[in-house]
């Protein structure tokens, strides 16, 4: 099993006191002070990985670095391409501190990570995400992942774009408190449709940006759960709407969160990556590692 980090953006904002317009971390790459903040963020996670002797997944800071969000922040296509190159280089530098680490090129949804909004067709999504997928792959990312995705067609398009580029890819859906994808479909339907429409070419699926209690009802019986390879949960049990409106960070309880992860292990036989999402930091990931990784070793 592999370990990854917690909530990058919430940690930078609430932990380091940084201002991230539009919740975007990639502008930090523009200066050495920002790059230092990113290295500082990763340091305790690397220590946890060393302590447990497990492989680690290092994300690029490019979740918001697509054309729409980039334009809002003053970055044109050429500038965004440089962002992806620089982000992969920094992630590779960080990954180099561990003997067995993977650089994960991160993409986010075209729109909001909590609300569906305007839906693209799968063809439109493939065209939209392909330049970012290609930039990450050409810069040397080992794989690419689309995080906090809210509807199926965008996921299908992303997987097709990754297949065209020739880079392994992972789709990570977010779910609401009822265990459904924000578009209203079940997680099972979302996974099965994406696999059907892409000939199963994704390396796997994940869930992120949801508390374990919200995710648990989604994992019913069926072969589809074998395709779920990762989980990165929120510290808070709040709904996405409540989190959007919150003025203070709800960091929950790290040990309780870790127990929620442990409860999912028996339902996710292919689980390979664990980490955190919004509201989590190195305390949560240490607790998850101590609980989940040791549990996995005992079982196997």
Image: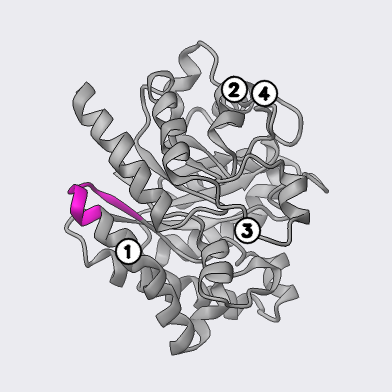
- Which of pointers 2 and 3 lies earlier in the amino acid sequence? 2
Residue 189 lies, in percent from the top left, at 64, 22
Above or below residue 262? Residue 10 is below
Q: CA distance from mark 2 to mark 3?
A: 26 Å
* Residue that numbered label 2 is attached to: 218
Residue at the spot x=53%, y=41% of the render? 171
Q: CA distance from mark 1 to mark 3?
A: 20 Å
Which sits earlier in the primary sequence, circle 2 or circle 4? 4
Reply above or below: 102 against 44. Answer: above
**Looking at the picture, does residue 268 appear above or below residue 72?**
above
Give residue 46's position: percent from left, percent from top.
Answer: 28, 61
Q: Are marks 1 and 3 in contact (CB under 8 Å)?
A: no
Q: Earlier in the sequence, mark 1 or mark 4?
A: 1
Q: Residue furthest top?
A: 221
Q: Which residues are magenta?
A: 49-57
Is residue 194 something one can see in this rendering? no
For disc 1, the neighbor class at 10 Å (few under 14, some 14 to 19, many from 20) is some
**Which part of the image, by quadrant, shows the N terminus?**
top left
Cα separation between marks 2 and 4: 7 Å
Q: Earlier in the sequence, mark 1 or mark 3?
A: 1
Specify which label sits upstream in the sequence, 1 or 2: 1
The residue labelled by disc 3 is 249
Residue at image mark 4? 186
Q: Nearer the viewer, mark 1 or mark 3?
A: 3
Q: Quadrant of residue 156?
A: top right
Q: Which residue is mark 1?
A: 44
Looking at the rendering, in which quadrant would you find the C terminus?
Answer: top left
């Amino acid at each position: 099993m592999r370990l990854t980090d917690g909530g990058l953006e919430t940690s930078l904002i609430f932990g380091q006191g940084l201002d991230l317009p539009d919740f975007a971390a990639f502008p930090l790459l523009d200066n050495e002070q920002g790059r230092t903040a990113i290295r500082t963020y990763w340091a305790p996670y690397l220590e946890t990985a060393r302590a447990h002797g497990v492989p680690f997944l290092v994300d690029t800071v490019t979740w918001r670095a697509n054309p729409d969000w980039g334009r809002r922040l003053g970055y044109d296509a050429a500038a965004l391409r440089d962002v992806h190159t620089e982000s992969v280089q920094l992630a590779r530098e960080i990954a180099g501190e561990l003997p067995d680490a993977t650089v994960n090129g991160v993409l986010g949804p075209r729109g909001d990570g909590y609300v569906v909004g305007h839906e693209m067709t799968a063809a439109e999504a493939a065209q939209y995400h392909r330049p970012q997928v290609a930039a990450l792959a050409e810069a040397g990312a080992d794989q690419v992942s689309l995080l906090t995705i809210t509807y199926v067609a965008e996921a299908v398009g992303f997987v097709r774009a990754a297949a065209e580029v020739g880079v392994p890819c992972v789709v990570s859906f977010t779910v609401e408190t009822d265990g459904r994808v924000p578009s209203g479909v079940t997680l099972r339907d979302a996974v099965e449709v994406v696999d059907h429409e892409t000939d199963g070419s994704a390396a796997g699926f994940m869930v992120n940006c949801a508390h374990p209690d919200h995710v648990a009802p989604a994992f019913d019986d069926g072969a589809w759960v074998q395709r779920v390879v990762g989980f990165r949960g929120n510290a808070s049990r709040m709904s996405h709407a409540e989190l959007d409106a919150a003025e203070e960070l709800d960091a929950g309880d790290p040990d309780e969160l870790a127990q929620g992860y442990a409860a999912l292990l028996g339902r996710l036989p292919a689980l390979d990556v664990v980490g955190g999402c919004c509201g989590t930091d190195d305390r949560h990931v240490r607790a998850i590692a101590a609980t989940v990784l040791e549990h996995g070793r005992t079982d196997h």
